[in-house]
Amino acid sequence: MSQFGVHVFGMWLGFVLSAGVIAYFVVGMGNTLRDQNQALAAARERTLRDAQLVELGTLAASTAHEIASFGAALARAMQRRGFAVELASDVRTALHPAGRTGYRYALVDLRLGSDSGLALVERLARSHPAMRIVVVTGYASIATAVEAIKLGAVQYLTKPADPDDIVRD
């Protein structure tokens, strides 16, 4: 092989080795970039999920506050009309004061915490047949209205119920 051939061979060898080294680093950079994009997408996903959880928690707290506010406002309105008012957040708690004599009225929310207000309506109607039971709900349906009346309620109103409608015979 001539000196020129050795020179050309050396140039090709240098070119191939340089191309190999460059290819190695380009592939490595591509892998690193792909890994960073995946990590960024996962972080974005976690942030979105966390934001959704915070939003859901805020909505739940807002709903709970709204429900408690409605109950408290309605209790104040009924007290101004001369009624003795006791609030309960579940069936068991509601049955305690209802077991005492002297209660002629019961205002029952269809949802009492994790309990159904219909269970309370049934028990109150059975144990106090003369009690006037009014059911209020933010989740009105014909089926629950019919069921509430069958169980002993005299009225079925949707929230926000007007206190005058509640006490009206």
Image (cartoon, grey):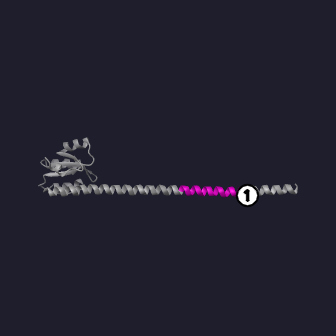
What is the crowding at mark 1: few (fewer than 14 residues within 10 Å), some, or many (at least 20)? few
Residue 16 lies in the magenta-colored region? no
Name the one closer to the observer, 63 or 111.
Answer: 63
- Inspect this view and state whether residue 96 appears: no
Spot the residue most to the right. 2
Q: Secondary structure at mark 1?
A: helix
Residue 4, image x and y in percent? 86, 56
Q: With 135 as the anchor, is 35 left or right in this view?
A: right
Residue 26 lies in the magenta-colored region? yes
Residue range (magenta): 19-38
- Inspect this view and state whether residue 125 appears: yes
Residue that label 1 marks:
18
What's the amino acid at mark 1? Ser
Residue 125, image x and y in percent? 16, 47
Q: Residue at x 55, y 56 (%)?
A: 37
Name the one closer to the observer, 61 or 151.
Answer: 61
Residue 133, image x and y in percent? 17, 48
The rendered magenta stretch, by its main secondary structure, is classed as: helix
Q: With 13 as the anchor, is 142 left or right in this view?
A: left
